[in-house]
Image: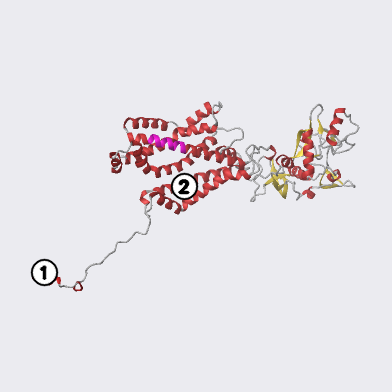
Amino acid sequence: MEQNNNNNHISQSSFEFVGVQTKETVLKTKPQGYYSEVFKRFIKKKSSIIALALIGILLIFAILLPVFYNFDTTMSEPYFKSARPRNFLSSGNYTRTLGLNEYYNLAGIGVATQFDDSNPDKSIAITIDDSMGYKYQPIKSSKNVDVTFMGLSRSGKEVSIDSYTESGFVYMPITFAEWHNIRKFEIESGRQVIYPMVDRYSSYVNENGELRGRPSTYLQNANYWYEIKDDDSMPFWASDANGNQKENQYIDNYLKFDINAPLLEEDRAIHEDLLGKVPENGDIMLYEISSGSASIVVRVFTYNEFVYRHGVEPSFWFGTNNEGQDIFSRLAYGLRMSLLLALLVAIISLIIGIVVGSLAGFYGGKTDLYVGRVQDVLIGVPTIVILSLIFMHWIQTGAISMFVGLLIGFVLFSWVGYARLIRTQFFRYKGNEYVLASKTLGAKNRRLMFKHIFPNSLGTLITQFALAIPAVILTEVVLYFLGILQLSNGQSTLGVMINEGAAFMTTAPYIIIFPVVAFIIIMFSFNLLGNALRDSFDPSQRGK
């Protein structure tokens, strides 16, 4: 008792605390969920940003840019076949080597476009040199070269050609109402569409004083507006007052009104309707009357005739193909359809795969057995065979559209991959303790399947979904490129356009370059996106 009393008198200052006194620290960081961490990992990757940027460019090109574009897929201009791209990087010109005949014929287009029907005297004394630099002159520059033809070396020209004006003139039947509309357009716009007719049916006297008839090419080609030599289609050059030949000055052969020719009353009425009077003797004619017809034949300049019909100048950003169809609008349409098809196939296949794979993986037994056998059968059937049968029996007969047929064909096989993936994940997680605990507490099967097990496979599914889109587009491109599937009515896909451009790789490579570049961007961007998603959802990367 005494010892205890002594201890009571010991002061606390006599004691020394040993050890480190610690305080409980408060965590300053907020808890971070799995998906928020996935998102942060995803946006930190350069590859994911590049993939999203490329996909965004494709969507803008396919959906937004066509709204501001002047032409669509229904346009088909036979006079602008293989027109080169005209945009802020390209003028639409191309280089080609011509013989002298071709050079003079092509240069003649630029000379003829300077004719003014309100001032006929302006049509004479115009040389090739005078027409150079003129807006509608197809030849933009030239230099002398030697060309080889049938083993012989001849003089020629290497020229830069404007692909939008080289088609020149064509003969075109139009109605009387159309005549008045065009003439009104010419007055309002200052652009001449209708040019003088050529005296195609007359004979001429050649250099030797012999009477010769016109060759068939001269009668049909509206670009021949001048006198030519019958042996090689070289133009006759005009001569001065002393009889000396002028260099590169054409002799025109325009159709002139002959007052001595018989004039039918119905033709007189047509003249008065079109011109308000009967032409005077020697007037240059801008049309030919077809007796007994409600139309006339005129010679139009294709460039300005295009402006008359469309209200804008021909300027195709990606050029035109061999059918005169605009590549830009067709490529945008093809991309839109391909991306929409691939996206729908991926979504529908994902839904079917989730439902079927979840049932097979959760219940197992006979359900899993039956589903597995169906999958084995579908995997063993080539996709191309089924799509070909759908095309022949349903699409070609008009029972369903091409888009619906492809959708059915792709979905028929695409869901199998999702189902197998989901089945594997269910077998992996359905025996875990937290699932059994939830089942013990009375959770229903639907809750167990889609609340506790299915979220574990979501990352893998998203990656599979991203990779399925380029896979569908690749198969579609191959089918169209091989000609197994065919489109009509001006429709297009990447495969069709690549197939069309393959025949012109040497003469007009731009026809195939643009769809191939679009296809490469699709494959690269979606595969890059799939790899980025796979790495972002990888559980082993958590916390890094």
- Would you call the spot at circle 2 few (<14 residues within 10 Å), some (14-19), or many (20 or more)? many
Q: Position of residue 138 (x, y in %)?
A: 73, 46
Q: Residue furthest left?
A: 1
Taking the image as drawn, is residue 70 in sight? yes
Q: Amino acid at mark 2?
A: Leu
Q: Position of residue 446 (x, y in %)?
A: 36, 36
Of residue 458 and residue 240, the one placed in the foreground of this image is: 458
Taking the image as drawn, is residue 264 in sight? no
Name the mark on residue 4.
1
Q: Residue furthest right?
A: 260
Q: Position of residue 352 (x, y in %)?
A: 42, 35
What kind of colouring is applied to the model shown?
A: secondary structure
Name the mark on residue 477.
none
- Read off the magenta span: 347-357
Which residue shows up at 52% across the image and 48% down it? 54
- Would you call the spot at circle 1 few (<14 residues within 10 Å), some (14-19), or many (20 or more)? few
Of residue 401 and residue 487, the one placed in the foreground of this image is: 401
Name the mark on residue 529.
2
Q: Give the total of numbered labels.
A: 2
Of residue 52 and residue 517, the one placed in the foreground of this image is: 52
